[in-house]
Amino acid sequence: MKIIYSEDHKLHHGAKELNRGEMVPLFETPSRAEMIVKRLKDTGFGEIVAPRRFGDAAIHAVHAKDYVQFLESAWSEWVEEEGDGQFAIAWVFPCRGLRQTAPESIHGKLGYYAFDVAIPIVEGTWQAVRTAADVALTGYDLLNGGEQAAFSLCRPPGHHAMRDLGGGYCYLNNAAIAAQALRDAGARGVAVLDLDYHHGNGTQGIFYTRCDVLFVSLHGDPRSEFPYYLGYFDETGEGAGQGFNLNLPMPAGTAWEHYSAALNTALVRIREFGPDALVVSLGVDTFKDDPISLFRLENDDYLRMGEAIAGLNTPTLFVMEGGYAVEEIGVNAVNVLTGFEQKA
């Protein structure tokens, strides 16, 4: 299995975030990807390749052009208006009862194009975000060229990014961009399996009215977990997409016995759908020691997870999402890939 990776991700480091009433060091740090790369090299897992550069069409097929243009220009607009600063971040949002219009001020734009305050923008953010999309698209290109599996080591992650909104550390939706590219290249159907602890609200929203992309997500119960406003079991799709969205929320403390049963349900639905390709939003923040998540998976459970996914016998692109227990993220992510390769 080839691994696609770029050190451009290091250009994005938001430094601080608001967590439980305090400004704390950002959980989504460059060390996350670095630890995965170290584990890949230490285990000799596979060939690490650089991403190809793709045009903007694949991104615009998923995201609104004005949103992409905002991401591209946000830092320069911030510097022009504010002069400098550690990072740019939203502090006011067009919520219910307010006008839904993008203001001229960068302060207004930051809130207009975000659903939370967890997407700080620094000088290198756009380059890192744009390259992460290319990392995902290079993975798509490998599958489209006949590879049976690939791992796009994307950072920052993407599954919370909606068509025209960022949030939850996510700016562009890498998994959705890859899934759409697979469809545009002729795949009759694509399934997206989201294994991150937090529901992939962005991916769900992007494909919610469609029957050609099946979205299946295993995650913490949104009644008490981020992103709170999507991820419920009764969200099953809309219009042509009715029945093509499956959410499997689980309670805090979920360990492998319960999780594996939900995973089996997810895989049964994917088999019924019969996709030409599978995109796995690979979050390993389901680990027992993750600092912002409440599941109880162990290191070896990720081997079993990979083995189960391999049982689908479907060309598979893994796209990196969350996981914030930095010392263990490499072990857990590579365990999924190892289990997949051993079973495939």
Image (cartoon, rainbow, N blue to C red):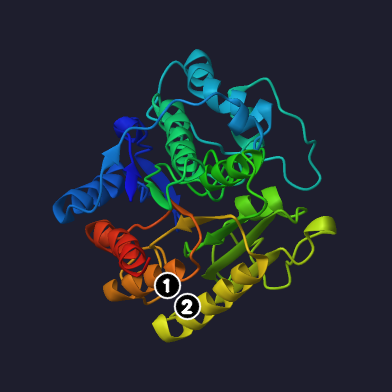
Left or right placement of residue 338 versus residue 39 in this view: right
Q: Residue at x 73, y 67 (%)?
A: 235
- Up the image or down, 322 lies above or below 267; here it is above
In the rendered image, residue 55, in percent from the top left (x then y), is placed at: 54, 23
* Secondary structure category for the residue under label 2: loop
- Up the image or down, 174 lies above or below 323; here it is above
Residue behind mark 2: 252
Looking at marks 1 and 2 on the same chain, the residue that comes earlier in the sequence is marked by 2
Q: Residue at x 59, y 75 (%)?
A: 268
In the rendered image, residue 251, in percent from the top left (x then y), is placed at: 52, 79
* Farthest right residue in view: 239
Left or right placement of residue 259 versus residue 288 in this view: right
Left or right placement of residue 76 versus residue 94 in this view: left
Would you identify the image quadrant in which residue 156 lies? top left
- Up the image or down, 83 lies above or below 197; here it is above
Q: Disc 1 marks which amino acid?
A: Leu
Q: Residue at x 60, y 65 (%)?
A: 216
Residue behind mark 1: 294
In the rendered image, residue 292, in percent from the top left (x then y), is placed at: 40, 63
Q: Disc 2 marks which amino acid?
A: Ala
Between 312 and 263, the residue placed more toward the observer is 312
In the rendered image, residue 224, in percent from the top left (x then y), is placed at: 56, 71
Dot 2: within a 10 Å radius of its alpha carbon, few (fewer than 14), some, or many (20 or more) residues? some
* Farthest left residue in view: 42
